[in-house]
Every structure is written in C-alpha cells, then in structure tokens.
Amino acid sequence: MTDQPFDEEPPEHLRYRRYLEDLEDVSEADEAALVATVLEDPNVSMAEAAVNRHLERRAAHLLTDPAFPAWAHTFATVIGDRPFLARRLREWTLLRAVALDESWTAEELTTASDWFQRTASVVLVVASPEALSLLAERGRTRRVRNAASRRLQHSDHRPDSIHKS
C-alpha cells in the first residue's frame, strides 16, 4: 500500500488547492508571474490542471472584453509550448471570434475539439447563426449537432434572445 494514512491528502492535492486559491485571488499585474510559478511545479499534470482551471475562468470572464487579446498574448507567452494549454487558449480565442462575429473559418470550427464544439453550441454569447448552422450540420458529435440545432430553432423564435456580452 502506501506510507500515507488514509485521512491525509497527498501533497500534490494540497498544492493544487492552494494554487487554485492563489490564482483566484491574483491581481492582473501578478497573474503572469503566478502562472509561471505554478507551471514550475514538479507535478506537471497537476500544475497544468490548475492553470487550465484558471485559464477557463479568466477567458470566460474576458471573452468579449477588449482586454482579451492582450491577456491572451501574455498568457500564451507564459504557457509556452504546453500543447493542451496552448490549444485551449487558441480555442477560447476562436470562441471570442465567433462571439464577436470576427473572422473565423469553417475548418477551424469543424476541426476544433469536442470541448470547443460543445461550448460553442451552448454558450449564449455565441451569436453567429453561421457558426451554429455549421455545428448543427457538421459538428463532431450528435450532442453538438443537436444543441446547435436547438439553439438555431430557439433563435428563430426570439431573435433578440442571444446577446453579445
């Protein structure tokens, strides 16, 4: 078995929780340095999971904010070549482009991850009927196609129900 009593959490669990708390409370000025520090943790999977939770929270909060591009650029620099985090940041940037009716391609949407397609098909901020139509027709999973179809039907009945934030 293990040397550790059942009632004690492994140290990486404690660090993970601490990282999440620190990232939740970090100022914008100190965010990049803290993310870099978390990513130096010897448990790479745990560190990236904590940073991903932070990325999800911050990207959702900043999605339609004019500060998003600068934040995303800084975040990309800090995360470097970590494949999962880099892909997730690119997908948040694509979600922003769709939400703000900026430039995107059908290939970007259809080759994006299941996470992106599910998020794009259900998030209220996605106002692009073109993106929803594409996902309803060519989404990777039935769940994505159905959700996008429902959104399209709902928007036909109440065109003002989907707002850009």
Image: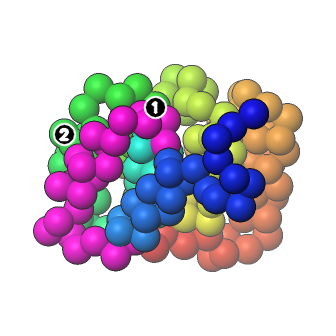
Relative image position of residue 4 (x, y in whole percent): 64, 47
Q: Is residue 51 left or right of residue 108?
A: left
Residue 32 magenta-highlighted? yes
Q: Amino acid at mark 1?
A: Phe
Q: Which residue position holds label 1?
A: 84
Q: Is residue 70 visible?
A: no
The vertical placement of 107 against 84, above or below, is: above
Depth check: 63 or 16 in front?
Answer: 16
Q: Does residue 67 appear to the left or right of 22 in the view shown?
A: left
Q: Secondary structure at mark 1?
A: helix
Q: Is residue 154 above or below residue 2?
A: below
Q: Quadrant of residue 131?
A: top right
Q: Position of residue 81 (x, y in %)?
A: 29, 26
Indicate which disc, 2 or 1, sits on the residue closer to the N terminus: 2
Residue that appears at 32% across and 49% down:
38
The N terminus is located in which quarter? top right
Q: Residue at x 51, y 59 (%)?
A: 14
* Residue hosting label 2: 77
At horizontal 43% and vertical 64% (from top left) the residue drawn is 18
